[in-house]
Amino acid sequence: MSLLRQLLLSVTVAMCIIFAGTLWLSLSGAQGYLNERLQVEARNTASSLALTLSQPGNQDPVTQELLLRALFDTGQYHSIVLKSPTGAIVHDLVRGSDAGGTHVPGWLEALFPLSAPTVTQAVSDGWKQTGVVIVTPESGYARQALWNVAWQVLALVVAAGLLWAVFAIALIRWLRRALQTEIAAQVNAIADMQATGSPAEPVPVTPRIKELAQVHTVIASVRQRVRATAD
């Protein structure tokens, strides 16, 4: 393998590692944010619902069920349960496992799991506790949001990789043409001059590639020696 290809391969591997690290950090940050949002949402909803049910006008079981049902029908909660002070279930609203299904692949859930916390809040009537409300948010929407972040970052990484591949191919072709002009063509001109004895074309004053300045100087010196020898 040529030195140029080794250099491009090493840069490509480094960029792949950088892209993979960027994807991992992005998903990890999104996972932490979504887990925190689920916890805050569950805690705020449980506090608000418990405060609403604690109002004197909301102690009726039918009113309580209407309030629970109105909140549950928003689709943002997996379960909302109201229990009596003795632990008996008064109202139990639980969403089925197939409800709110998402198209999130299993590998994403395995690598970046999201946990929906269960928050318990006491319901009281004055100084007397009348029940306990238990709220568990629905994590399917958070998983879908995480998957959206994943494929967006992945699409960006793939697009950047394709752009880098096009750039690398163009860079290799340009370097080949430049090396052909700077080195191969001039060395062949020296060989032709030595074989035929005719003067060669003048060497450019400055090379097109600055990194080849030393090689350019050596070739010019060799041309002068060959010309002096021919003379």
Image (tube, helix red, strand yellow):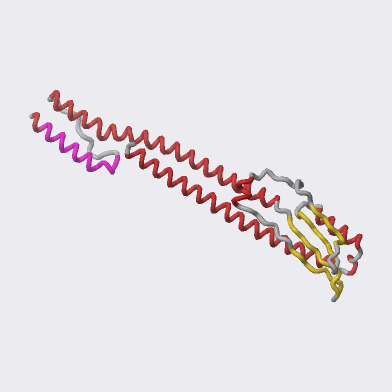
Q: Nearer the viewer, residue 89 or 34?
A: 89
Q: Nearer the viewer, residue 210 or 3?
A: 3
Pick the quarter of the image with the C terminus: top left
Let me know if residue 214 is in the magenta part: yes
Q: Residue at x 78, y 49 (%)?
A: 96
| Residue 69, horizontal then vertical, whole percent | 84, 55
Q: Main secondary structure of the magenta part?
A: helix
| Residue 203, horizontal then vertical, whole percent | 21, 34
Pick the quarter of the image with the N terminus: top left
Taking the view exactly as shown, the residue that stands out farthest to the bottom is 127
Which residues fall within the magenta stretch? Answer: 209-227
Taking the view exactly as shown, the residue that stands out farthest to the top is 196
Q: Residue at x 38, y 41 (%)?
A: 8
Q: Quadrant of residue 87?
A: bottom right
Q: Residue at x 45, y 46 (%)?
A: 15
Q: Residue at x 78, y 56 (%)?
A: 79
| Residue 229, horizontal then vertical, whole percent | 8, 31
Vertical position of residue 123 compared to residue 68: above or below: below
For residue 213, side relative to residue 157 (left or right): left
Let me know if residue 142 is in the magenta part: no
Q: Nearer the viewer, residue 208 or 167?
A: 167
For residue 194, side relative to residue 53 (left or right): left
